[in-house]
Amino acid sequence: MLTFTTTAVLKVEKEDVEYVFMVIFTVEAIMKIVAYGFLLHPGAYLRNGWNILDFIIVVIGMIIHCESAAFNEYGKDHLWLVGVEVSGHINVILSSSQRSAYIDFSRRVHLSIVTVLEIDCGECSITVCRVVSVILTQLELKAFDVKALRAFRVLRPLRLVSGVPSLQVVLNSILKAMVPLLHIALLVIFVIIIYAIVGLELFCGSLHKTCYLNNSVEVAGDDPHPCGKGYRCPEGEICREPWVGPNDGITNFDNFGLAMLTVFQCVTLEGWTDVMYWINDSMGNGWPWIYFVSLIILGSFFVLNLVLGVLSGEFSKEREKAKARGDFQKLREKQQIEEDLRGYLDWITQAEDIEPEGDEGEDDDGSSPRQRKCLDF
């Protein structure tokens, strides 16, 4: 008994809708190429970065659709199937004619690929073969339908950017800010490393004591926390080691890596007060707060806010550039209109100066030929 895995009808409908949008995008690209030219002169289609993005998306879509059409045409005559034997029945689990074949190996223990079926729909013949690896290789080659390129379809919403100048300003400002942001990132890493080393020297091993029940190895309470000079265990409990530490042993200063992670947590302002209170409970309410307050002021309020400053500065620059480009474009259009108007007036003047011989004088209505031409024009 053969059972075939079929794709959903909804997917076919989505593929049809995709063809419609593909045609729209392709026509748009062709019209822009005809209007602006392709590449070889200033202002051409591919001289604009956003047009390059649109062109790449259109080309990838055309490759996918052309390949899918060729694959579907081939699949009408030849079909490769890989089957598995379950309780004496052969169930087809892979078909080269399906765009997205479904392979279910959840029952790997009970399944074994033992049969390969070559079906020629034209002659209605079935051939059984046991050379699984060879057929799988052929399937893999035939299944190479550039499906990996389909992932680039997620870039299609970026085509909206090419039509919205405000979005172009935002993205351009982010791209221009990459180098300054890299410098700020290095500064943040430098601050984190320094504070991680200081914390490693001051707080190493300080978060592994908690309250235990007397004469027991059971931790007291459902939510244990560090104890020591700053926090005294209640009566009937004793503060001692070992304890894995807060957050299952992730938050501590026992080694350089975890110290950097803890400092980074504090810099992001995510639970930094809890870390400070744990250190105070373990070491006392003396000076540890100086470490954390200085870290927050320097690492969070100062360094991280530089990111906002850089982005804001680049955004202002790009906005001014966009405004200048818009003003320049308007000025250019105005100059072009004035040049066309001057040329038009020169043409009228030359037309007035050209008069046929023997036509001098006035007509019956009292107007000269020059005046009549101007009136007719």
Image: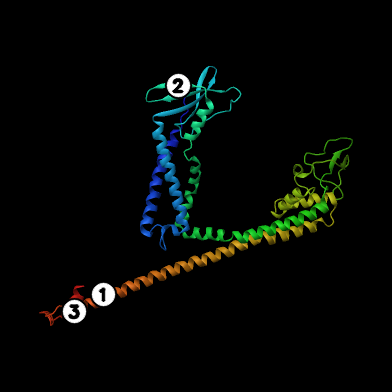
For this orientation, the residue located farthest to the top is: 88
Judging from the image, what secondary structure is the residue with disc 1 in? helix
First in residue order: circle 2 vs circle 3: 2
Residue 344 located left or right of residue 104: left
Q: Residue 301, relative to residue 244: is it above or below? A: below
Task: Between residue 24 and residue 146, name the one nearer to us.
Answer: 146
Residue 295 drawn at (x, y percent):
75, 58
Residue 363 located left or right of residue 104: left
Residue underneath mark 1: 347
Q: Residue 126, relative to residue 186: is it above or below? A: above
Residue 212 drawn at (x, y percent):
85, 39
Residue underneath mark 2: 127
First in residue order: circle 1 vs circle 2: 2
Disc 3: CA contacts within 10 A as few (<14), some (14-19) or many (>=20):
some
Q: Amino acid at mark 2?
A: Thr
Residue 194 drawn at (x, y percent):
76, 57
Disc on res. 335 = none
Residue underneath mark 3: 370
At 49% from the left edge and 31% from the top edge, which residue is drawn?
138
Q: Amino acid at mark 3?
A: Arg
First in residue order: circle 1 vs circle 3: 1
For this orientation, the residue located farthest to the bottom is: 361
Query: How far separated are the C-alphas under marks 2 and 3?
Result: 94 Å
Which quadrant is home to the C terminus? Answer: bottom left
Residue 190 drawn at (x, y percent):
72, 58
Mark 2 or mark 3, whichever is nearer to me: 2
Judging from the image, what secondary structure is the residue with disc 3 in? helix
Disc 2: CA contacts within 10 A as few (<14), some (14-19) or many (>=20):
few
